[in-house]
Image (cartoon, rainbow, N blue to C red):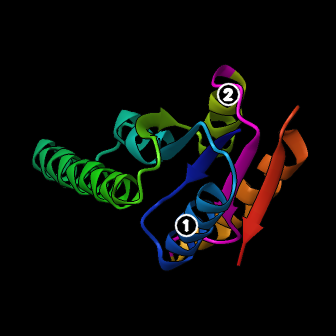
Amino acid sequence: MKILACTDGSEYSKKALQQAMEIADGCKVNEVVILHVYDSKITNILSYSSEVITPDLITQYQQMLEEDKKKKEKMLLEAKKIFQQRNIKTRTIFKEGIPSETIIQIAKEEEIDVIVISSRGLGGLKKVLLGSVSNSVIQEAENCSVLIVK
């Protein structure tokens, strides 16, 4: 069995990681793949031209995105360590893209048996978008089960 555990660093996704760990502990799991998708919609904002967006603002925004990516990479490594402490074979994937599409693509490529994802993610606008991510994953996942963790 192979599990894909999706995370965005939110409290909800931490619960999903915990659930994936419990499943891996209780079953004969070959590997847990921990995935974070860095939403390409956020980075694409830089491609819009406007009189309001100055070169300084673009530079600041790029720096902010790079800092956020480093935090997310660190989050993945910390999650991996927790799984490894329980002797669960774990690998991380950090990929930029549209979250629901990327999760489905990775699940197919990796021949995943179970996708574990939270029902919600980060707050604000992302909260609305991530609710739709889990819904899209349920609708589009093929040849694997999807566990939604609340």
Q: Nearer the viewer, mark 2 or mark 1?
A: 2
> Which residue in the rendered view is the most extreme toward the top?
109
Q: Is residue 95 magenta?
A: no
Q: Which quarter of the figure has residue 95?
A: top left
Nearest the viewer among 106 and 122 is 106
As displayed, is residue 74 above or below residue 109? below
Q: Is residue 111 magenta?
A: yes
**Residue type at tag 1:** Lys
Task: Name the N-terminal-most of marks 2 and 1.
Answer: 2
Q: Which residue lies at the image location 46% right of the left edge and 41% below the top edge?
A: 89
Is residue 63 visible in this depiction of the protein? yes
Q: Residue at point 61% right, 55% down?
A: 24
User: Circle 1 — which element?
Assistant: helix
Are there few (<14), some (14-19), or many (20+) residues within 10 Å of tag 1?
A: few
**Residue 148 to residue 24: above or below:** below
At which x and y percent is residue 11?
49, 79
Q: Are marks 2 and 1 in contact (CB under 8 Å)?
A: no
As drawn, the label of residue 126 is 1
Which of the image's four quarters has the N terminus? top right
Q: Is residue 133 above or below residue 150?
A: above
Q: Which residues are magenta?
A: 109-122
Residue 87 as seen in the image, left or right of residue 62: right
- Which residue is disc 2 drawn over? 105
